[in-house]
Structure formats: structure tokens, C-alpha cells
Image (cartoon, helix red, strand yellow):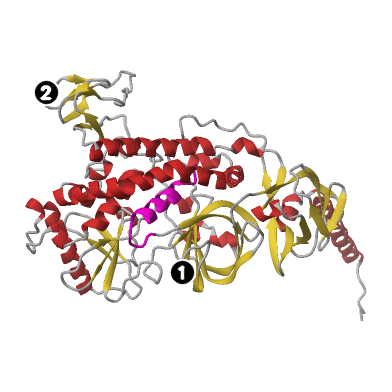
Amino acid sequence: MIHGRISFGNKIRIFMIVSSCLLLGILLTGSYLQTDHEKELAKSLYFEYRLNGETLRFGLWEDEETGIYQLFLPSFFAENRGEFLLRYKGGKGTVKIDGVSYRDGDSFTGDGREEIHSLEFLSPLGRVCGDKGLRVLVSENVPALLFTAEDKEDLFSIEEFANKKYIETGSLIMVDGEGKIVCKESLERLKVRGNLTATLDKKPLSFSFHTPLGLCGMAPGIKWNLLANATDGSYLRNKLVLDLANESIYGYEPDGAFVEVYLNGSYQGLYLLTEAVEVAKNRVEIEPRESWFLEMELDFRMEEDIPYVITGKGQIFAVHTETGITETEKEKIFDRLSDIESALEGQEGISLQSGKALGELLDLDSWAEAFLVQEISGDHDTGIASQFAFAPQKENSLLYAGPVWDFDGTMGNVNTAMFKNPAALTASVEQSRPEGNANQNRWFAALYQNDEFRAVVEEKYKNVFRGNLEEILDVKLKSYVEEIERCAVLDAFRWHEKRLGWMFVLPDDLTIPPGGDYEGYAQLQSHVRMAETFLMQKKDFLDKLWIEHRDFCIVEVQNDIPVLNQDYNQTLYYWVERGTPLQGLPQFVDENGIPYGYVDKKTGEKVFDGTIIWEDCILEPG
């Protein structure tokens, strides 16, 4: 019998297997030693701060252009010495700051200076795998919202957001500028919101509490929004328009306050915290089961699980409801809206459907206020999106224009040429999009043709809106710039040049930062001047039109030129005082570099920039 005797050949094979395993181990060890663990360690490192018994966590962000890691801290650290515990996810890791080693749980004290500290990352085997810099950047003036979510990556995933269903739970700690915790709550939901802005790296968010709470002096509510203002270099457009609406309109309008946002310790930047537009106490206070709550919407943003009513003229309204809606109810809404459209189109504002005058079908005051907000701001979504409305379901009730919303694409920050011109009454123009586009400004344009409505608009501008607009220009705008100036620098630095690519329009006097120190990203003043100039010129134009009642001619400039993108360079409108020169006529060249000119469509005469205008006219290339 053979009792376990190993042949010579098997011994050789075993020897070769063992040798191979040893060699592989040596290679893997060498590879591990050569691997750069810097990113892994930096991502796992948190600076933990204890505030009134609560733990706040702040992570690092690397400026890849300089290789320096930044520690962004909320504004209350400007008056508080930062004493942190260094924490590593998983409890393993070591860094050296200015030559001093810090392991998990070790204490680090920052003195608030913005000098660049040396920062070394040590691998688990003690090897230096990164030698960078560390700078502490402290904000000013605004409160901080610190969110914790289970999975930040999934929350920010475009794939998850595609159906707008992905929701996280989590928690929120809000700290004011003096270091007082003003809110500590678990969240019912936390999600990415928005449409175009949701596709950008700086995400807009919405969150909900389990019970109503008030934030930043605003009335208690369950749902809240965080506007990223990623497309608005001034950060002010939404806030200024909400202020104008709140000061000028008796009914409910959403309010907002500037905040900075952190998510799982990661600095996200400067945001505008706003009340959510919803049917609720302290918001739109209507009885949801006895009223309809509608919103004008774009055709390409229609979703399968939201009911819509499309009028005979093609105006799209989303029906916001928590309980769903029957086909019968949709027919009733359609009939109500059709009655209004009949009055809008009817002679002397009388509906052929019911025989009622326009003022018996919709509330002229609220719609005039909505018209003025859109016109003053120069909103490129005027009459096509983000315009809410509500009506009691009972017969003979009026349709009211609801709260205003969504104003980052205003005050010249628009990529459609018509809305860049402050000296034009754009809210009165029906074809605000290219011919064939389903999204047109039907309602506001038709409303302005009604004498009674136009009189309400002029009266409200003269006695209410004009004074509030002056206050914004003289007082509030400057005050807000002082409030957010430091935050705006840090936000612009955090998102670098990619932020410039998010904006619809860049100011003419903007200088692109060459890189280097973070203060080189300070661009706030250029963007603010652009918004301020638009509002000043818009006020000057409306004063002439509605207060001084000067005599204007309307010049329609048709730019159906093959070399132009008609989505952005469609028909322009100019209001020109009779007997004065047309100014700002666009100049285009064809593919051969030959300039296009313009001719009066009626007379065939050539028209140039500077031509004296005596009557309404339509210009076309020629």
C-alpha cells in the first residue's frame, strides 16, 4: 500500500504553486505601496465639530488646478475658534498638518487664518502618498443648512433623477451666522428638483419635514426648495423678483432667504431657500377638494403621471392634485378655460360661450399683477411656464393668477434675443417663440389688448410696483450684494469655470479668471451690474409708456435668416418713440461674410440702425 507518499513530480508542482503565491504577494504588496491613496484618504477624512451637543462634519474639496485642498466652513466660524476632531471613515488613516500627525479622533485647532498649511497623506503602511496644501475658507453673513443623506451619489445621479422619483430621507441641522442651532429635524424626503438646472453639477434641491416648521423668519411649512441659482451669476434674480411680488401683491407670494448648503459634509455653495408653491396653510390657502390649482407648462416637460388640460388655443395647464382627477373634472376645467379664451378673443372682451365679460371670468387684479412681475423682470418664460392659477370649482367663480415662480432667466440673462431688450413690452407679444412652436404667450398678450385690463396694469404700475421697484434699485440690491459677496466668491471658486458655461448670458464687462488664487473667481459685481442695468432701463421705458404716455411705434424685426438658429434669434420687437431713431438693430452676415440689411415690408424702403421711425412697421431681411 502507498500511505500518502508524494511523488517527486508533485513536490515540484507544489513548490511552483507556493513560489507563485509568494511572488504574487510580493507584487501585490509592491503595487499597494506604489498606489496613490491620496484620493481615498482625502475622501474619507472629515473635520468634526461639536456645537451645543450636536456633531457637524466638514469634508475636504480639492482645487485640482492648484492641488490645494479647501475646507469650507460656515459663517459662524468667523467669530469662533475652530477646534475639530479628525475622523476617518472606517477609522483608519493618518494625515500630517504642518508636520503634526493626526489619527482618527485626534484634535485639530484652526485659528481662522487663510494661510495655506502643509498637508501630507499617509497610507496605512505609513508611506507618504500625497503632499499638498490645506486652506480653511470661512464664509460670512448667511446661515448654513447641513444635510445628511444615506447616499449622496444616488441622490445626485442623473439616471436616478430622470423620472423625478428618486427620494432620500435624511436629517437637517441649520446653524445661523452666530453659531446658534435654529433647526434640527429628520426629513420626510430630500430630492433633486428642477428641469434644466437639475442636469448641472450644482443641484437644486427640495426637502420636506414631517410637520410644518418655519425657517429664516418665513411662515411654517412642510415643503421647502433650495434654488441653486447656477445659471444666474448675480445670485439675486429670484430673490429680487420674489421681493417685488411680496411687496406689491396682496395675495400669497413665496419668500426666500440666502443660505449655504452642505450635503454629507460636502460644501455645495450659495443657495436661495424658498417656500414651496403648494396648497397648504401659510401658502396657497384654498380648499383642495373644492378648487383647481393649475400651472402653465411647456409641451416638452409634460409627464405621464400628471394630468393636463390643453385649451383650444393650445395653452397647456398642468393640474396639481394630491388625489387625482376624473375625466369629468378635466372637462369642467377645459370648459372654464375655453370660456375665458373666448372672452380674450371676443369683441369687447365678451365670451361667445357664456356671454360674460372677461372681468366676470378671471380676476383682473391678480392677472395684472402677474403681468407686471413678468414684464418688469423680462422673464423668458412669460405666459408659457411657471405661471400658477387657481379657481373655486363652484359656478360663477373667478380664475385667479397664483404665486409667481422661477426667475433665473430674467433681467437680460436669457438666450432668446427678444427678452434681452428692456425697452420692449415683451409680455404683450404673443409669438414669443418661433413659428410652429407650441409654447407661445397667448394669454398675457390677449389680456393686454383688453382696455379694462390695460387700465388696471397701468394703475398698479404707477401706484404700487414703480415705488417698490425703486426701493429694490436704491436699497435692497446693494444690501443683498453686501450680504452675499463673500459667499458668492466661495461658490464661484467651488464650481470654477464650469459655472460660466451654465449661464444663459455673460455680462459684456466680465473678465474670465486666469486661475490661481480663489479670489480671482470674484465675478459678482459684473453680473449684478447687468441685472441692475436691465431693471433701470425697464423702469425708464415703463415710465415713458404708462406714466408719461409718450407716443411709441412698434417695430417688428423678422430675422428668418438661414444662418441663424431660429430658437434664439427669432422675431424682435422695438418700442420706438415716434420721430426718433431706431437703435440696436442687429447686424448679421451670411456665410460669405456679406451683411444682411433690412427693408420695410410695406414700403420696400431700406431701414438701417438710426433710421427715424414714424409709424408701426415690419422689417424683414433684404
**What stretch of residues is rendered in magenta?**
233-253
**For numbered disc 2, what is the local secondary structure?**
loop
| Crowdedness near tag 2: few (<14), some (14–19) or many (≥20) residues, C-alpha within 10 Å | few
Q: Is residue 344 magenta?
A: no
Task: Name the residue: 71% across, 41% down.
Answer: 67
Which label belongs to residue 221? 1
Task: Name the residue: 30% across, 45% down.
Answer: 375
Give whichever of 418, 52 is nearer the camera: 52
Give whichever of 544, 105 is nearer the camera: 544
Q: Is residue 506 left or right of residue 430?
A: right
Residue identified by numbered label 2: 603
State which tag comes first along the sequence, 1 or 2. 1
Q: Amino acid at mark 2?
A: Thr
Task: Name the residue: 14% across, 54% down.
Answer: 344
Q: Is residue 130 left or right of residue 454?
A: right
Q: In which quadrant will I find the C terminus?
A: top left
Asked which quadrant contains residue 11, the reply is bottom right
